[in-house]
Amino acid sequence: MKIIKQHRSVLGFAVIAGLILSFSSCKKDTDPIPDVPVITILEIGSGNSHTGTAGSDLHLEAQIVAEAGIKEIEIDIHGEDGIQYSINHKYTDGKYIGAKNIEFHEHIDIPHAAPAGSYHLHFIVTDKKGQRTEADADLTINHDH
Amino acid sequence: MKKTHFISISMAFILLSAIACNKDKHPIDDVPPTIDGGFAGAFPKQCGILKRGESFTFRARFTDNVELGSFSLDVHHNFDHHSHSTELGECTLEPVKAPVNPFVLIRSYDIPAGQQSYEAEITIPVPADVDPGSYHFMIMVSDHTGWTDMKGLSVHITE
């Protein structure tokens, strides 16, 4: 009788431990935290020259992986060294939105009014969980004479 | 007798909790879909010709391990000789030129629900007044979770 009682208490402990373990492992598996978006800039300007021309378009190419799905892509170009000029494009609908892996390929108009000089380009991706990743690069804008 | 009952009930409880746990788990689909543009009826193919003032029929096969979502087409000029990471290589390139009235097509299409395999067939007219020359023909397919595959082709629009 004593042996049975001992066995019962060990078994009881095993059952409770097993239940706790199975529930805790369940929680982990059903609610994984997706990785933050990853941006790999491939080309800025034709031939990755990091150069654009005012009055023309700027070729942009990047690979984006966002496990939670892409919610928004923002391209922000702003002047450096005293140039007070900026270009901003936001993509909130279309083929990229909702996708998890894309080749971002766009040609962004650079207006004639953009002064020649040094600029900085920011590539900002927000996923559907609100996680945000930013990549940046230098850009020179020229004028054709 | 009592001990046997206790063991059976305990085992049943553990088994049930394990089954319930399995039910809650959604297998993570991390496999992107694929585009097949290599079969005999696929169009266009690399370096294919599209004629101005005529229609062509786009044809490709998409497959996914679970369920397809949608596909999109993006046709744009390559008069500036730009590149894509998914590009298969250029055909005979013409000299760089400025676009006047380039052909542009950016359109998305839904794939009926529940399909693991789908053959797309879309008739696309090419207006008679668009600029002839080198174009990029980008095909993108998404599965139901948002994984995508992209295929880039170089094509020519001629008279």
Image (spheres, coloured by chain):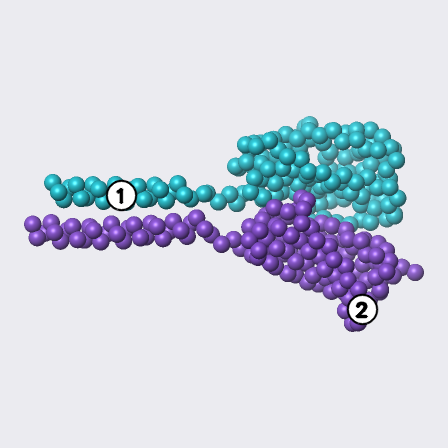
Q: Position of residue A144 (x, y in %)?
A: 89, 59
Provide the chain ID for the residue under circle 2.
A
The reply to whether callout 1 and callout 2 are in contact (CB within 8 Å) is no
Q: Is residue A80 left or right of residue B121?
A: right
Q: Residue at x 15, y 51 (%)?
A: A7
Q: Position of residue B47 (x, y in %)?
A: 76, 37
**Disc 1 with disc 2 on a shared chain:** no
Secondary structure under tag 1 reads helix
Task: Characterize the local packing of mark 1: few (<14), some (14-19) or many (20 or more) Cα atoms within 10 angstroms.
Answer: some
Location of mark 2 (residue): A83
Provide the chain ID for the residue under circle 1.
B
Q: Residue at x 61, y 59 (%)?
A: A133
Colour that chain B carries in the picture = cyan
Name the amino acid, label 2: Ile
Location of mark 1 (residue): B13
Q: Can residue A123 be seen in this snapshot?
A: yes
Q: Residue furthest bottom?
A: A81
Q: Residue at x 82, y 67 (%)?
A: A117
Q: Residue at x 88, y 35 (%)?
A: B129
Q: Which mark is residue A106?
A: none
Count of numbered circles on the image:
2
Mark 1 to mark 2 CA distance (whole Å): 70 Å
Secondary structure under tag 2 reads loop
What is the quadrant of residue B8 in the picture?
Answer: top left
Q: Is residue B150 left or right of residue A3?
A: right
Colour that chain A carries in the picture = purple
